[in-house]
Amino acid sequence: MAPVTLSVVMPVLNEAQGIAAALKALAPLIKRGAQVVVADGGSSDDTVALAQAGGAAVIRSPRSRALQMNAGARQASGELLLFLHADTLLPDQADALIAQALTGSCRVWGRFDVSISGRPALLRVIAACMNLRSRWTGIATGDQAIFVTRAAFEAVGGFPTQPLMEDIEISKRLLRLSHPACLRARVLTSGRRWEVRGVWRTVLLMWRLRFAYWRGAAPDHLAELYK
């Protein structure tokens, strides 16, 4: 298998508390030739300095996860793009798993299964439901570390410039090109937003927002509800 360059794009905003650990976890990939691009949306803490110290290429972007990821992708040099949240850890050999899933395959994108860290046992049920739903529908969430060939990413116009549900929308667009590679290797994402807001409250809110989006609600309106 010919080597394929991987670029990890990480959108951040005030992630000083965890950015050093996030980049340290990516060190093995960097040693194997992966590139890490941190797209900062205007952090007011030490995120940028810590990201630069951690060996990442740092770019500035208007605040919006979709805009930041698109900006990071434009600066990235890899043939494969992996969009990773700052509070999400990849499985071992993630680069090899992605290359194996896409190289020589009809699939042009994919995602990992997810585990959610945290004390509530319900988080494990939520993660299992997320993985099963994604496998059935072909829709991936940002927590599952979406990866895609550069050609496919550009073919669908990148992430839609909307403040919420950008992961769902790009999944729908990418499904026109191929079904995703649903890798059973798991990323580990933080359960902090569920714990801070309340697990059941967050679950119900997200289902409400998804249903409204399916019914055609404007992403700007949904973003206000999410806040």
Image (cartoon, rainbow, N blue to C red):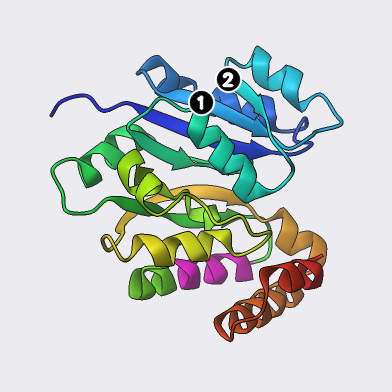
Residue contact at pointers 1 and 2, CB within 8 angstroms = yes
**Percent position of residue 219, x then y:** 67, 69
CA–CA distance in space, label 1 to label 2: 5 Å
Q: Position of residue 171 (x, y in %)?
A: 43, 62
Question: What label does residue 198 carry, if any?
Answer: none
Q: Secondary structure at mark 1?
A: strand
Q: Quadrant location of residue 7?
A: top left
Quarter of the picture holding the C terminus: bottom right
Quadrant location of residue 86? top right
Residue corresponding to mark 1: 36
In the rendered image of this protein, does residue 127 appear above or below residue 152? below
- Please identify the quadrant where the N terminus is shown: top left
Q: Residue at x 72, y 19 (%)?
A: 50
**The disc label shown at residue 56, or none:** 2
Residue under the point 55% across and 34% down: 72
Q: What main secondary structure does the magenta stretch of the protein show? A: helix
Q: Is residue 189 left or right of residue 220?
A: left
- On whether residue 128 falls in the magenta region, the answer is yes
On the picture, is 60 further left or further right than 135? right
Q: Is residue 126 left or right of residue 63?
A: left
Magenta stretch bounds: 121-131
For disc 1, the neighbor class at 10 Å (few under 14, some 14 to 19, many from 20) is: many
Residue 159 vertical placement versus 93 (above, below): below
Q: Amino acid at mark 1?
A: Val
What residue lies at 53% left-to-right and 42% top-to-bottom?
A: 84
Q: Secondary structure at mark 2?
A: loop
